[in-house]
Amino acid sequence: MSSSSRDGFTSTFGVLVATLGSAVGLGNIWKFPYLTGTNGGASFLLVYIIATLLVGLPVMITEIMLGRASRANAITTFEKLAPKNQKAWKLVGYMGVAAAVLILSFYTEVAGWVFAYIFKALSGQLGSTDPAHTKAVFGELVANPQSALIWQWLVLGFTGAIVMCGVSKGIEVVSKKLMPVLFLLLIALCIRSLTLPGAMQGLEFLFTPDFSKINAAVILTAVGLAFFKLSIGMGTMLTYGSYFRAEQNIPLTATRVMFADLTVSLLAGMAIFPAVFAFGFEPAAGPSLVFITIPAVFHSMPGGSIFMALFFILTAIAATGAILSILEVPVAMLIERRNWSRKKATAISILTIALVGVPAALSQSLTASWKLFGMNAFDLFDYISSNILMPVGGILICLFAGWSYGLPKLKEALSNGGTLNNPALIKVLFILLRYVAPLLIVIILLNGFGLI
Ligand code: PHE
């Protein structure tokens, strides 16, 4: 496909909401709260923010830049931008596509539960203040192989249909409509939660650090979350970058997305923890916090079933935007490298994900006994992608930009050919990419795995 006929985002606002739509997802509403809950609250939040600033933001800016400079999918980008004698860089692209499939195979499963929960909330099935009851409802959903698979397939079909419509007519149009709704719902939920008697305790939990909780594993988890949150290290931001407009200010857009994404996580934390504490629930419930604790919490408050339904609609919106962006990684690759139509590329991608997703979807039923390193398929896919593939992809992207692509080209690409001039900032970014970020990630990875 020639670059002139290549699809792309059509406006500055479109770029911003689509990129934010990728960053905001289950990571903010499902992962961030439960990880904060189980890793010591505010101290974890602090490490996560530092990781986001020192490592996350530089990698995000670089990925978008590389994508826009090549105007191609994750694999072709490295082929185009790397010197002829450094062909191996394209393996980073292959790794990204593999990570995208792996992430989607569990992510669409969680999204499936969220969609199912909208109906459960509306039909009153979650109407109990007793977590034992909501636990039973959740258990029934995930332990039933048919419902686990069907909800995952519905999500794949729904998001696949949007991706089939294209980047500007599908992804951008849907993001523009959904993102404002997401913010409105989130703010409404926050106000509800913060005005409950006893809400302060939840805020204290979120904002008072307990440094004794910080250890190597917690730091690795925080870095993994920073990668997962900003959709980096596996080609998503690179692919979206390839649709950025030529005049878009990349560092500014990335910084805005990072702050908006952090705001959504904090708002989600402020919607969840005050309510959890106000009704005396357990903040460290783990991955099921959103599916077991939250329904019981909502049912404890006046107007609870409406707020519960709104909560799951909001979460479904967030998940949808993120899935579109992950799906676009293999889809763009197949369209451009195989010359397939968008329809065919999307259909083959979602079929592959549905297949790889089977063990993850059934990990609470038929494949529950399939364990590797003590983890079932669902947890393993999550662990491998967030804690290994994305950070390693991040290191390689930094090394590529810092050592192979080089400062002059980086300057040229980030200043939009000299129209935006910020040499000092670019210098700082370059030092972070060349030395600080890769070294930090390596140390954290080795340390997290107990190797140093
Ligand atoms: N950032 C998304 C979230 O927080 C997840 C995601 C990961 C999206 C990787 C794209 C790529 O839910």
Image (cartoon, rainbow, N blue to C red):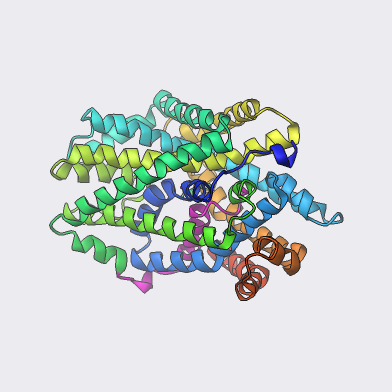
The extreme right residue here reads 85
* Quarter of image, res 319: top left
User: Which residue occupies 49% across, 36% down?
Assistant: 360
Q: Position of residue 134 (x, y in %)?
A: 25, 37
Indicate left or right for 188 with 40 as reference.
left
Residue 210 magenta-highlighted: yes
Q: Position of residue 259 (x, y in %)?
A: 44, 61
In the figure, 162 relative to 191: above or below?
above
Whether residue 318 is visible: yes
Residue 102 magenta-highlighted: no
In the figure, 184 relative to 274: above or below?
above
Where does the magenta region start and end?
208-235
In the figure, 189 relative to 141: above or below?
below
User: Which residue occupies 47% across, 36% down?
Assistant: 108
Nearest the camera: 364 or 422?
A: 422
Nearest the camera: 35 or 180?
A: 180
Indicate left or right for 182 with 20 as reference.
left
* Quarter of image, res 402: bottom right
The extreme bottom residue here reads 424
- Quarter of the image that includes the N terminus: top right
The extreme front residue here reads 419
Nearest the camera: 188 or 360?
A: 188
- Quarter of the image that includes the C terminus: bottom right
Q: Position of residue 43 (x, y in %)?
A: 37, 68
* Dominant SS type (magenta): helix
Q: Position of residue 89 (x, y in %)?
A: 76, 53
User: Which residue occupies 69% across, 67% down?
Assistant: 411
Indicate left or right for 127 with 226 as reference.
left
Nearest the camera: 396 or 141?
A: 396
Whether residue 376 is visible: no
